[in-house]
Amino acid sequence: MAIQVGDKAPDFELKDNHGRTVRLSDFRGEKNVVLLFYPFAFTGVCTGELCELRDNLPRFEDRGTQLLAVSNDSIHTLRVFAEQEGLEYPLLSDFWPHGETSSAYGVFDDAKGCAVRGTFVIDKEGVVRWTVVNGLPDARDLNDYVTALDAL
């Protein structure tokens, strides 16, 4: 079961597409976080969602929000994907231990070996304020994230 609104967001430590360590707690007290889990780099729906976020990044930055996108791909895959698509926000690798962070958020699909499409809006205190979880083929609407951020 996915983490619910009102829950404290589990902290994590993951490597980004440049090999840098990123922790959720790094943003506590500083920024809201939109934490977005997606199945795999280079797939149609995922690429579409992440490029839409790229094209609308100022909508998040203007709201004092850090966007973090997590998949179970390796950092090497994520580096090439980010370069190919011009993604300038952190792509985090939940590759090893495989799916540990996705599982902590309740969005890891054991049968498929990847995260489903879960999104969590986390406030500056580390509390989940909005969430949506979609199945693998179902894209999310980024306007829903922005509306949730505006309600903080």
Image (cartoon, rainbow, N blue to C red):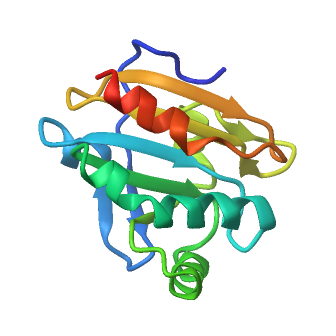
Identify which residue is drawn at 66% across, 42% down: 140
- Please state if 53 lies on the left or on the right of 29 as rendered: right
**Residue 6 in view of the camera:** yes
Left or right? Give the position of 137 relative to 125: right
Q: Residue drawn at (53%, 26%), measured in percent from left and top?
A: 131
Q: Is residue 129 left or right of residue 46?
A: left
Q: How many marks?
A: 0
The C terminus sits in image quarter: top left
At horizontal 21% and vertical 26% (from top left) the residue drawn is 125
Residue 17 in the image, given as x and y percentages of width and height: 45, 75
What is the x, y in percent for residue 37?
58, 47
Q: Where 135 falls versus 123 (above or below)?
A: below
Residue 106 in the image: state x and y as whole percent: 62, 30
Q: Is residue 83 left or right of residue 45?
A: left
* Nearer to the camera, 98 or 59: 59
Question: Which picture quadrant has residue 63?
Answer: top left
Image height of 48 relative to 25, above or below: below
Q: Nearer the viewer, residue 70 or 96?
A: 70
In the image, residue 139 lies at what x, y percent? Answer: 73, 46
* Residue 95 visible at all: no
Looking at this view, name the residue that lies furthest to the top.
6
User: Residue 44 appears in which quarter of the rendering?
Assistant: bottom right
The quarter of the rendered structure image containing the N terminus is: top right
Q: Residue at x 33, y 58 (%)?
A: 58
Residue placed furthest toward the left:
29
